[in-house]
Image: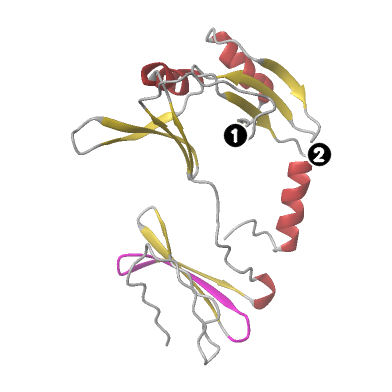
């Protein structure tokens, strides 16, 4: 019987034991649960997800299915400072239909961040207090745009236009084979909305990754 204990779930650790049993160990936080990844000397793996002292799930992976746990597992959020927080909230809530998740305040009680939930583990956050206008410069280095996925590009575009909000570019098929259209948020940030088609380069890349790791695109 082997037991691995994470004294602090905020610390990511990797240990190699001389016995060869624990070749890969990494705790991390996902909501309020902790996941432990353990691999034996033969390469067989086990994923243990716990909440407090309660084991929520055990998942065993034989050697041929094991994928080394990546250091980065995804994008959690995108953050931007805005001049007009009220207009920004209205746009992302009413036009893009994001759900406000929570708000953070500073020590004096002033609003510091507004968080919106996009889907799965993804969020977007907005900071008030912007002063200068944002200006997109095609030749400038830095952030170019932010892209959100939609199930149906044509339906999403019509839904947005029906609310009276203009599109920057209408629906078209991009070079990668996806359907895409563009709009600007109230602060002038460029937003792309994309539908992944089965024959797109992105869909083919995801399929190749799934086949390579026996259906596992991530940890």
Instruction: State whether residue 218 is above or below residue 116.
Output: below
Q: Residue 164, how many percent across, how many down?
A: 54, 7
Along the horizontal axis of the image, is 13 left or right of 52?
A: right
Crowd rating for badge 1 (residues with CA inside 10 Å; few <14, some 14–19, many 20+)? few
Along the horizontal axis of the image, is 7 left or right of 57?
A: left
- Do tag 2 and tag 1 residues touch (Cβ < 8 Å)? no
Is 53 contained in the magenta span?
Answer: yes
Is 168 contained in the magenta span?
Answer: no
Residue at x-position 75% and y-position 32%: 178
SS of the residue at dot 1? Answer: loop
Instruction: State whether residue 177 is above or below residue 50.
Output: above
Residue 143's label in the rendered image is 1
Q: Residue 122, how many percent across, how many down?
A: 49, 41
The residues tagged by marks 2 and 1 sit, at their Cα atoms, a distance apart of: 28 Å
Residue 199's label in the rendered image is 2
Towards the viewer: 27 or 217: 27
**Which quadrant would the N terminus be assigned to in this image?**
bottom left
């Amino acid at each position: 019987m082997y037991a691995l204990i994470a004294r602090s779930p905020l610390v990511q650790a990797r240990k190699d034991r001389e016995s060869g049993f624990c070749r890969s160990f990494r705790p991390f936080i996902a909501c309020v649960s902790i996941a432990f990844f353990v691999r034996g000397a033969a390469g067989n793996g086990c994923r243990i997800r716990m909440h407090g002292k309660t084991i929520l799930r055990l998942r065993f992976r034989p050697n041929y299915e094991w994928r080394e746990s990546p250091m980065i597992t995804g994008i959690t959020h995108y953050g931007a400072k805005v001049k007009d927080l009220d207009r920004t909230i209205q746009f992302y809530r009413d036009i893009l239909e994001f759900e406000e998740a929570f708000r953070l305040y500073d020590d004096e009680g002033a609003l510091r961040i507004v968080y919106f939930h996009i889907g799965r583990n993804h969020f977007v956050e907005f900071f008030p207090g912007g002063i200068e206008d944002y200006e997109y410069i095609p030749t400038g280095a830095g952030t170019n745009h932010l892209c959100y996925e939609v199930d149906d590009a044509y339906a999403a575009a019509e839904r947005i236009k029906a609310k009276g909000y203009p599109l920057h570019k209408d629906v078209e098929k991009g070079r990668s084979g996806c359907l895409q259209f563009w709009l600007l948020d109230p602060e002038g940030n460029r937003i792309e909305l994309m539908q992944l088609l089965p024959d797109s380069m992105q869909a083919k890349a995801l399929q190749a990754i799934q086949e390579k790791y026996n259906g596992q695109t991530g940890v």
